[in-house]
Image: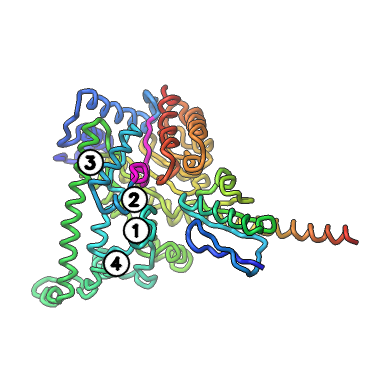
Amino acid sequence: MNINWEELSSDERLEEMFRAWLSPEGVEFVSPEAEEAYEQRITRVRDALQLRVPDRVPYIPLYGLFPAHYAGMTVEEVMYDYDKAHQAWKKTVLALDPDLYVNISIAYSALVFELIGYKQIKVPGKQLADPKATYQFIEDEYMRADEYDEFIADPTDFMLRRYYPRAFSELEPLQKLLPLRTGMWTCWFDLLAPFGDPQVAEALDSLVRAGQELVKWYRAIGKFDKEMQGLGYPNMLGCLTFAPFDLIGDSLRGTRGIMLDMLRIPDKLLEALEKMTPFAIEIGIRGARAARNPMALIPLHKGAAGFMSDEQFRTFYWATLKELILALDEAGVIPYVYTEGDYTPRLEYLVDVPKGKVLYHFETVDIYKAKELLGDVACISGNVPLSSLQTGTAQQVKDYVKELIDVVGKGGGLMVDAAAGFDDVPPENVKAMGDATKEYGVY
Amino acid sequence: MKRANLVEFGKIIIEDVDVPQVIGVSGFLTLTFDPMKATIEALEEAGLRDSIKVMIGSGQIDDQIRKHTGADAYGRDAVIAVTFAKQWAREKQSEHQLGRAFIR
């Protein structure tokens, strides 16, 4: 996008992002009807998001690995074979007929993980016995509590020489490198010498191979996106970014580590959170602009009620998350705040954002209270219980969606989605969620 | 005296050891719904279900899943689990006292 973003106001930036989303590059629509449907779907989503009454409540199922199960494939298969993922996800999009689709990137590429020995994802059929299981994210203390100063002083150096060697088995030799920040004059002699180490060279080779595989994977994702958009379906997600607390908690300190840090070394943690905030903002803006799609998904992992006290949430979690939300909005990017766990006690904080600019997804929440407090502030999605989707009847799901539309959909401000990503769920129940939205959601 | 031993998802073997008063089953993913059900069914098959209270818990659990699995109670955090356990222990105690009073 050749746009001078600096010269634009935040509203103009958002307008540009919508313009880009509405005109996907390199997409050929299969028919004039498909092109019209594409535009209609984005307009529907935009109206709901900006708290105007749309023609109908948008249906935006952010499914997890449901497509693999629905297509009769194992999760292992779709993680290794991009064509299979393409088939499964396409079958799902066509069957669900959603207003926004989720692409195959959620299946990841197990090939990339293997090439660099990524330790944080356990792949089904490999590190997990059942090939149909959902992949699992494994936390560890990849940064020790006494390493905060080193991280804060130079995060890039810490990532290169500490995090990558620890979290990726093939990159372990990178710990032999020296900090590259002082290569001036001929000081680089010392700094570049470790690159002559055969083990370091092998690590670099595996980086190249992983990079090449990532390019293949990105091509497969692009191919999928173009096909779906050609059929009239807009992509749900421009990019993914994270609350600064989760960036540090998920990948560097682990839940146990970061929870203890709040008590033992609160000042260090706060300093690190402030350091991370501009990076979280950068990921969101760069990603959304590159994807020409304003939706920046922010899944919230560790801020739920029961995980930390109200005061801890305010101090450690919300302060920098709010900074991220405001900065994305300023850049014309839509924060799609995907809460996980119970957020009823957090609602009083969530109201404190610009009006009609944020999409709040809920897993578990007092939905009446959410509508009461957020109704004038932000669009709401989610909350259709996975328990009903997985073990209930289609009628039960329909009834829930109808209730949701009656209560939360009143006057707009609702998009329908399950409470969380869903995997091996009866297809008739998923279908019921969409059917009910289309049946009862017309304004 | 018997002990429940989880061998692999969905397959439970009951061995001879201590029978607890309460069993708590934690499951954070939707994938755990059916194995929880299988656990409770295994207790039934072993003839232990009536003497044991079973609670299930996590953010994904609600009354729908309690019914699906056949558990006695569900909760979303550890604090509620303690509350249930204490309540059940009290009930059990008063049952014993009632029993003694009756015999007397």
Q: Residue A74 carries which label?
A: 2
Q: Residue A224 carries which label?
A: 3
Inspect this view and state whether residue A336 appears: no
Q: Which amino acid does label 3 sit on?
A: Phe
Host chain of mark 2: A
Q: Earlier in the sequence, mark 2 or mark 1?
A: 2
**Label 4, on which residue?**
A163
Q: Mark 4 lies on which chain?
A: A
Identify which residue, A186 or A251, lies in the foreground.
A251
Secondary structure at badge 1 equals loop
Between B6 and A435, the one nearer to me in the picture: B6
Q: What SS does tag 2 mark? A: loop
Kindly report which numbered mark, 2 or 4, lies closer to the viewer in this rendering. 2
Chain of the residue that carries numbered disc 1 in the rendered image: A
**Residue A67, magenta (yes or no):** yes
Q: Do labels 2 and 1 share a chain?
A: yes
Identify the mark nearer the N-term, 1 or 3.
Answer: 1
**Does A395 sit above or below residue A279?**
above
Residue under the image location 39 percent in, 70 percent down: A145
Find disc 1 in the rendering and name its residue. A125
Where residue B82 sits, quadrant-wise, is bottom right
Mark 1 on the same chain as mark 3 = yes
- Residue in the picture at 20% in, 25% down: A31
Q: Do the residues labelled 2 and 1 touch (CB within 8 Å)?
A: yes
Query: Can you say which quadrant of the picture contains the C terminus of chain A?
Result: top left
Identify the amino acid type marked 2: Thr
Identity of the residue drawn at 33% across and 70% down: A149
Residue B73 lies, in percent from the top left, at: 62, 50
